[in-house]
Structure formats: structure tokens, C-alpha cells
Amino acid sequence: MYIGNGNLEERVATKTFKLGKYTIYKGTRFNLLVSAFHLNENFYTNPTKVDLKRFMDRSNISKSNKSCAYMPFSLGQRICVGRYLAELVVQMILVAIINAFDITAPEDYEVGAIEGLSYGPDSFYLQIKPKYSPKK
């Protein structure tokens, strides 16, 4: 799971509520640290492990959707206006790549991870071979 640009989402409390030992009063501006959700063991097993199959498990998908734990484009009225376009473009690119190439990972290869201002793979290796011979 990667946390890209700015991890903070600014919000204004619409009602007074308790957050742990703190009271947030109605009208108070506060920031949500999105990576705190993304890297929380209450929502994801081994959250700091780069797990490419994380969202293929139906129980994880259902759990994260109900709790809003995974929100790369934010949520609510301030959701990213380009979200659906971005998702569609990514899908089109993936289909084109998968149609043109055989993609495999080396046997027994494990992805390493780095943590810092953002979180991502240390290195990631794939074997990519064209499915078709180039036309001459």
C-alpha cells in the first residue's frame, strides 16, 4: 500500500466528538493523517508489508470499505474530481500491457519495503516478455 502525496486531509468537525482522550468540538478544524488508517493493524493484517494480494481477499475489501480505512482519493464532498478518470486510465493501461506482454515475478522473490515520508517498495523486479514478435 502506497501513500503518495500529502497524507493530511483537512476537515471541520460537524459535531462535538471524542477522539481517544481528546474532545474535538463542533467547528474545530483538524487534519486526518490518512497513513494512520492505511498502516493500522486494526484494519489490515501486516499493514507495513507490501502485499500485492491485499485487496483480492474479499474479507479485507469488505472490511476496508465499511470502515473507510483505504481512501487514496479522500472521501465525501471533497473527493478527488479526477478519481474515476484516473482509475479508468490505469485500467486501460494495464489491459494494454497485459495484452502485449507476459509478466512474471522471479521464483521465490519477495518485495522489500521502505518507510519514510511516504511508504513504498524498496525494489520490485518483474520479468517482462513480449507476447508477439514485433512486425518488420
Image (cartoon, grey):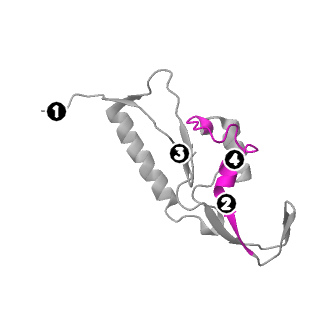
In the displayed structure, would residue 70 be above or below residue 16? above
Q: Which residue lies under the disc numbered 4?
A: 64
Estimate the spatial distance between the alpha carbons at disc 3 and disc 1, rounded to whole Å.
37 Å
Q: Which residue lies under the disc numbered 1?
A: 135
Which of the numbered marks, if any, corresponds to residue 96? none
Residue in front for this viewpoint, 54 or 6: 6
Residue in front for this viewpoint, 18 or 74: 18
Which of the numbered marks, if any, corresponds to residue 120? 3
Where is residue 80, by image quadrant?
bottom right
What residue sits 52% from the left and 33% below the top? 111
The residue furthest bottom is 27
Identity, as a three-letter code, of the amino acid under mark 4? Ser
What residue sits 64% from the left and 51% below the top? 70
Secondary structure category for the residue under label 3? strand
The earlier-in-sequence mark between 3 and 1 is: 3
- Residue 17 placement, left or right of 84: right
The residue furthest left is 136
Identity, as a three-letter code, of the amino acid under mark 1? Lys
Quadrant of the drawing holding the C terminus: top left
Q: Residues within 10 Å of mark 3 (few under 14, many from 20)?
A: some
Estimate the spatial distance between the alpha carbons at disc 2 and disc 3, rounded to whole Å.
17 Å
Estimate the spatial distance between the alpha carbons at disc 2 and disc 1, rounded to whole Å.
50 Å
What residue sits 67% from the left and 36% below the top? 58
In the displayed structure, would residue 77 be above or below residue 92? below
Closer to us: mark 4 or mark 1? 4
Identity, as a three-letter code, of the amino acid under mark 2? Leu
Q: Residues within 10 Å of mark 1 (few under 14, many from 20)?
A: few
Q: Which residue lies under the disc numbered 2?
A: 33
Estimate the spatial distance between the alpha carbons at disc 4 and disc 2, rounded to whole Å.
16 Å
Where residue 21 appears, as percent x and y from the top left, is 87, 62
